[in-house]
Image (tube, rainbow, N blue to C red):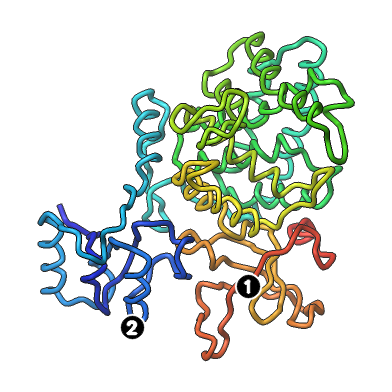
């Protein structure tokens, strides 16, 4: 079997090699591109400061056949750490592979399919975000309408109808499978107005997108969507004055609010047909990797896999939503905040994979480029989450452009000395500069 990706000690890297992966998250390094050909000594020096082991793609770069053969031979020999590589590293993807193996044993993991467009493994993009926008909008409305109905039933009868909820999530599952960018666009567009946004629906969509990224089968995607919709079903049992409290809350109110987890678990216990992963999501979405969460202070692997997915999706949606006592974070700032939480609130691998799902600059988020111009993100770049496709709306003076312009950032130079060099300098909150992303796909 041919070897394409070879791990080597950073002390042995050289110009012409193509670095495809690091032994640490790309976001923790100064490198903009997630995959690049080494072209100068400065890049080698930077790699040696940041990493111990790097992965070289032998089919890319400018290596001779002899150099490739030597690298492959090196791959087959036991490696001894050199002074440049004594920093302890974790096995990349270990947690996610464990989760996928577990689901495979249970018959719940979708074996990888081949993308016709790119040759990568996973679900294919079947349509454009613009073409999917109408279906995504309708799917969001169905979820919102059903969420109100299930909360009313939970309040009156103390249970929910799981089969009805399963039917309600079908349009969202279909839309995300065709193109996840469209529902992401719908969510961020609605976040601009708290009256039109439903946190449970948004969290369900993030869970669904995360599951798609992890290549879960359709049944598990439905489970993730249902679990996301039900995370806060326990609020139905809280006094309205507490559930709808505004402004800063007292410690007593905080204690009462935390009871929504227990109430939600009880509601599901009195409902028929609730899958265990759904119950895990409701029970554990406020548990944290370092044991600082509630209600049980679970630590590390004590938190079931779907509880971890629910926790990070719910946290991300909370940070990017307007609350009574806080303004919403820009998506970029929320991604940076999650990055700071790795290994603490959430397992490092969960954060890394979630950010790979969402991107540092999610679809429909507003960004400011290094020249001061402002754009809205149209599509993610799966090979580099920092270089998406954007639609330029405002010039460097923040004046509207006569004609908005689509820019593929992956095709532009990063070197400031080169003409046309552009990169994203910062993100902005929803509605900044009076821009409503919802208008773009109408």
Which quadrant is the C terminus positioned in? Answer: bottom right
Residue at screen point 84% across, 49% down: 193
Which numbered tag is attached to residue 110? none
Against 404, residue 224 (above or below) is: above
Say how many tags the image has: 2
Neighbours of disc 1 within 10 Å: few (<14), some (14-19), many (20+): few
Q: CA distance from mark 1 to mark 2?
A: 24 Å
Q: Which mark is residue 40?
A: 2
Front in this rendered view, residue 240 or 372: 240
| Vertical relation: 335 (above or below) 37 | above
**Res 146 seen here:** no
Q: Earlier in the sequence, mark 1 or mark 2?
A: 2
User: What residue is at 67 percent from the left and 18 percent from the top?
Assistant: 262
When the figure is inspected, residue 272 is found, relative to residue 341, above or below; the finding is above
Image spot of residue 217 (x, y percent)? 46, 33
> Which mark is on residue 425?
1
Whole-percent x and y of residue 393? Answer: 74, 73
Q: Is residue 145 above or below residue 53?
A: above
**Horizontal placement of 182 versus 416: left or right?**
right
Q: Which quadrant would residue 153 be assigned to in this image? A: top right
Residue 90 visible to the viewer: yes
């Amino acid at each position: 079997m041919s070897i394409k990706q070879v791990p080597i000690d950073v002390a042995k890297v050289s110009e012409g090699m193509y670095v495809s992966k690091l032994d640490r998250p790309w976001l923790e390094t100064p490198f903009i591109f997630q995959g690049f050909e080494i072209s100068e000594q400065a890049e080698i020096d930077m790699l040696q400061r940041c990493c111990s082991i790097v992965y070289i793609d032998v089919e890319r770069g400018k290596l001779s056949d002899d150099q490739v053969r030597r690298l492959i031979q090196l791959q087959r020999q036991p490696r001894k750490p050199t002074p440049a590589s004594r920093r302890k590293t974790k096995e990349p993807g270990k947690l996610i592979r464990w989760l996928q193996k577990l689901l495979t044993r249970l018959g719940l993991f979708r074996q990888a399919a081949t993308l016709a467009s790119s040759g990568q493994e996973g679900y294919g993009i079947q349509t454009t975000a613009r073409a999917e926008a109408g279906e995504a909008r309708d799917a969001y409305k169905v979820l919102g309408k059903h969420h109100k109905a299930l909360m009313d039933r939970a309040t009156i009868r103390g249970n929910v109808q799981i089969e009805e909820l399963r039917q309600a999530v079908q349009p969202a599952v279909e839309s995300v499978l065709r193109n996840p960018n469209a529902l992401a666009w719908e969510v961020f567009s609605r976040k601009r107005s708290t009256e039109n946004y439903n946190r449970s629906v948004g969290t369900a969509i993030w869970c669904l997108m995360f599951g798609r990224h992890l290549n879960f089968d359709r049944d598990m995607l439905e489970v993730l969507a249902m679990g996301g919709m039900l995370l806060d079903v326990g609020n139905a049992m809280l006094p309205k004055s507490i559930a709808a409290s505004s402004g800063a809350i007292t410690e007593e109110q905080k204690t009462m609010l935390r009871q929504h987890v227990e109430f939600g678990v009880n509601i599901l216990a009195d409902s028929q047909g609730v899958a265990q992963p759904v119950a895990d999501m409701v029970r554990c979405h406020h548990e944290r990797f370092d044991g600082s969460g509630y209600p049980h202070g679970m630590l590390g692997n004590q938190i079931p896999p779907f509880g971890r997915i629910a926790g990070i999706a719910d946290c991300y949606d909370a940070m990017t939503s307007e609350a009574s006592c806080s303004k919403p974070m820009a998506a970029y700032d929320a991604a940076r905040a999650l990055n700071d939480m790795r290994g603490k609130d959430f397992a490092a691998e969960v954060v890394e994979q979630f950010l790979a799902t969402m991107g540092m600059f999610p679809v429909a988020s507003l960004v400011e480029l290094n020249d001061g111009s402002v754009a809205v993100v149209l599509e993610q770049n799966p090979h580099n989450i920092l270089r998406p496709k954007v639609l330029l709306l405002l010039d460097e003076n923040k004046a509207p452009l006569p004609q908005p312009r689509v820019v593929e950032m992956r095709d532009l130079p990063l070197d400031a000395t080169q003409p046309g060099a552009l990169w994203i300098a910062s993100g902005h909150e929803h509605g900044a500069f009076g821009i409503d992303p919802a208008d773009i796909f109408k």
